[in-house]
Image (cartoon, rainbow, N blue to C red):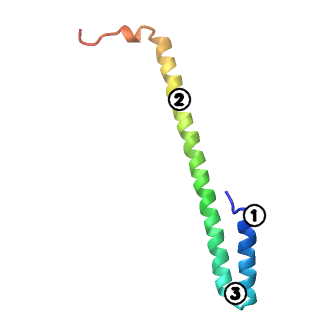
Amino acid sequence: MSLTTGAKCELKALLVSLVMLGKEDIARRLQRIGENCQLSQMAAVKLAEDAIVDSALTAATICFSWLHILRYVPDLYTVRIGG
């Protein structure tokens, strides 16, 4: 995920304005904040994607294991314990 085109233009205009006003230190800090924000968003998206893949793999593994059990224990539902 990244900044929208409009947000990039606004940020760039703000940075240019700050530099023109002699506020380079503020412009640098603002640019760093924007970059960190973008990196944080990208990391969050990656974590979410990994979690989705992990849960999908876990579900698929559970389904496969269950089908494997049913294949080798066909009368699983009829087995009674303690009676």
Earlier residue among tags 1 and 2: 1
CA neighbours of label 3 inside 10 A, class few (<14), some (14 to 19), many (20+): some
As drawn, the label of residue 61 is: 2
In the picture of the structure, the residue carrying the numbered disc 3 is 24
Q: Nearer the viewer, residue 56 or 3?
A: 3
Which dot, 3 or 1, sits closer to the camera? 1
Label 3: state its secondary structure: helix
Q: Amino acid at mark 3?
A: Glu
- Where is residue 11, by image quadrant? bottom right
Looking at the image, which residue sits at the far bottom? 22
**34 relative to 55, above or below:** below
Q: Position of residue 65 (x, y in %)?
A: 50, 23
Quadrant including the C terminus? top left
**24 relative to 37, above or below:** below
Label 2: state its secondary structure: helix
- Where is residue 78, by image quadrant? top left
Q: Position of residue 67 (x, y in %)?
A: 51, 18
